[in-house]
Image: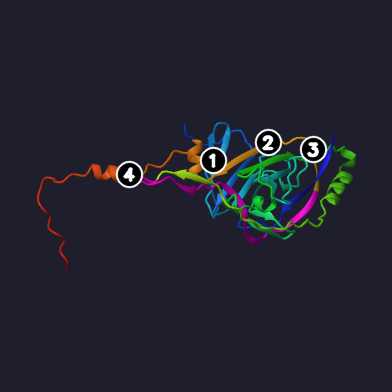
Amino acid sequence: MNYQFTCLIAACLALGACARPVVASPTPHATVEILVDGVPQPHYAHRGRLYVEAWKGREYAIRLHNPYAVRVAVALSVDGLNTIDARETTAVGARKWVLGPYQTVTISGWQTSQTEARRFEFTTEAQSYGQALGKTANLGTISAAFFRERAPEIASDASNEVHESLRRAERSAPAEQQAAPEAAPPAQDAASAAGETRQARKVPEEYAATGMGRRTDHAITQVWLDLEDAPAETVDVRYEFRPQLVRLGVLRAAPQDNPLQRRERARGFAPGFSPEPPRQY
């Protein structure tokens, strides 16, 4: 069964055991990279999932690569929300980004009009775009489904007519506009000990999500594509702040200095004499 989908081409890209870093396979695969200040963040494989570290308050972008010799349409969601219209749909029914053969494209934010986007920004659940919309079931996830364009069956004596039909289908149409409300309910708490004679106290425990950052230029053009029925590949990425990655076993905890143990290692005397102080010239 053939499907035609509305897809968008980004015409003006904005600035656009513990786990181990993932090693690239020699077989070409669709890739999804998370960029902070233009630098790809390490992916960590853990229990069958991919993780990246979220940096609170920092803007990020998503870089998509098409490894195929045909165009692909990518259904891209952040926190379960489509990055084009913020809807919760299936990958098949989602509006998609179009990449040419072997093309790499960077998506830097939520598309809010045909010419503008709002930057992706790592924040807390309470300050997230999903919380503002009341859609919080899939916070902390980034998902990209790559659908290949269906190869047309072209007869030699009708090739010109088919190419003309495809060109007509790629004429632009206006994109929809999505608003950007905000909200900030309170975050969760977790208890921590504060010493032998102190009472246990509550400290807020924060979980990563994505908010709306700065407004930026990001012009798009709408086209129609005849796509394959199922995605050729789907890439799912989980992101969390470092303390949560440590709790999940994705990263090792950094060694911490224990002041009491340091003082217990102290000694009163050491061999030798008192050194002369450095001369002042």
| The label number, if any, that marks residue 213 in the structure image | none
**How far separated are the C-alphas under marks 1 and 2?**
17 Å
Q: Which circle, 4 or 1, is nearer the viewer?
A: 4
| Badge 3 or badge 4: first in the primary sequence | 3
| Badge 3 or badge 2: first in the primary sequence | 3
From the top left corner, tell me how far across and down residue 157 is, in percent: 90, 40
From the top left corner, tell me how far across and down residue 86 is, in percent: 72, 50
Q: Report the amino acid beneath label 2.
A: Glu
In the rendered image, which residue does mark 2 sit on? 233
**How far separated are the C-alphas under marks 3 and 4?**
64 Å
- Asked if the residue under mark 1 is in contact with the one under mark 3, i.e. CB atoms within 8 Å, the reply is no
**How far separated are the C-alphas under marks 3 and 2?**
17 Å
Q: Is residue 203 above or below residue 218?
A: above
Q: Residue at x 12, y 55 (%)?
A: 275
**How far separated are the C-alphas under marks 3 and 1?**
33 Å
In the rendered image, which residue does mark 4 sit on? 258
| Badge 4 or badge 2: first in the primary sequence | 2
Magenta-colored span:
194-223
**Label 4's element?**
loop
